[in-house]
Image: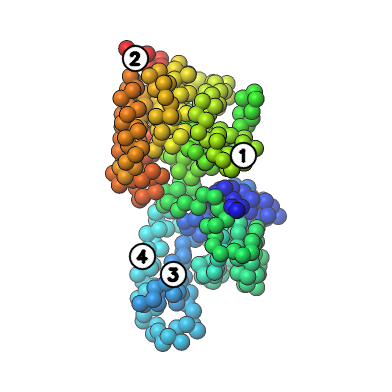
Amino acid sequence: MALFADRHDAGRRLAAALQRYAGRDDLLVLGLPRGGVPVAWEVAQALHAPLDVFVVRKLGVPGHEELAMGAIASGGVVVTVPELLDTLGIPPAVVERAARLEAQEVARREHLYRGDRPFPDVRGRTVLLVDDGLATGATMRAAVEALRRLGPREVVVAVPVGAPETCAEFQQDVAETICATTPSPFQAVGLWYRDFEQTSDAEVQALLAPPLMEVEREITLDLGPVRLAATLGVPAARRGVVLFAHGSGSSRHSPRNRYVAGELQRAGFATVLADLLTEAEERADAVDAHLRFDIGMLAERLAGIVDQLGRLPETRGLPVGLFGASTGGGAALVAAAGRPDAVRAVVSRGGRPDLAGAALARVRAPTLLVVGGRDDVVIELNETARARMPGEVRLEIVPGATHLFEEPGALEAVARLAVAWFERWLGRGPAPAAPG
């Protein structure tokens, strides 16, 4: 049974085990890309510590690349396994050649993730090295050794889940090892996550980007019968607010929606990522998935949040857009039909507009439907729904993308399309006139 919903959930639970480090002036959190960065982001947020990335690349034995003869890490530090080199008779020139090749990839990733910002000075600091889990620990071991050579005061290894024997081994190697959970039998890191989808480069970039926010805080939305948790992000200058409706089985911590929200914030839009189910409902839904397809209920809650946006100090008076993903696309369209004077535009990513049913004929908000080019079934559903919608509707197909837009550049394409659509339609004038 999964211990964590996703990497963000794991990061928050790991942070609870690291509270004694909160507020330290010398603290630095380094995430191992890519999967360790969402975990590290939550830890850094909870401990009020700076966050950066520590890139590690394995140096594989020629002809047996899965076997590590060493590693190269951020800062150009090369670590080798002398016993293995001696046993296999690998000369220094082979190691140097492999290191030169991998150094190019380290440099590429560092520039991709960090831009022009230099690697942080770790001398004399307490560094938390964070990953999403420890199985054999090979990558983390290389990171520890490489980091030590840069002169930190102490290194702390922190992971949400790890193999008991591996966590025990690391206790001897660093100042402290924090494995929040050590299930046995362990088998693999991914088994302990309900959502263990690959973290994309775009998501890492978004999490590491310098904050452009005037306000970013967790809020509670009181809808009468229920109270829902949400994350409110408000840039210093804003032209509108976009409310996200996540897909089936997801939450406000969806890394894909968080990435798109970050791009919208850079473009000057406030964002609200809300859970549409309470914690108790999420637990029940995880068993039989009966609530995630209750489009009427989800749409009613979205509409209630739209009403609240008109009262929140940070969003009052801002034009409202909806961004729906998967089943959230159907719920967003029903909510838009129910609040025609408030919702100015809708974007659906890999959405199920067909689930909006008869409400499609009442949607007057300009709608952008974005679908992956390899998501054949959903393309057909979106084409059928578009034909039933009387207002301004555009269907954009991202070539080569599947349903979750995990392919390189796919999520970035979604974000660009969403930003352009909301820039066009979230103006200050009156809401669009009813069609026909």
Farthest right residue in view: 20
Q: Which residue is mark 4?
A: 104
Residue type, numbered disc 2? Pro
**In percent of the image, x 70 and y 55: which residue is there?**
20
**Which colour scheme appears in the figure?**
rainbow
Tag 3 residue? 58
Q: Are marks 3 and 1 in contact (CB under 8 Å)?
A: no
Q: Measure how far apart labels 1 and 2 are at the Cα level.
A: 40 Å
Q: In the rendered structure, which disc, 3 or 1, sits on the residue that comes first in sequence?
A: 3
Mark 1 = which residue?
Answer: 284
Which of labels 3 and 1 is toward the front? 1
Residue 68 picture quarter: bottom left
**Considering depth in this image, is 12 or 123 the residue closer to the camera?**
12
Inter-mark Cα distance, 4 to 3: 13 Å
Q: CA distance from mark 1 to mark 4?
A: 48 Å
- Quarter residue 122 falls in: bottom right
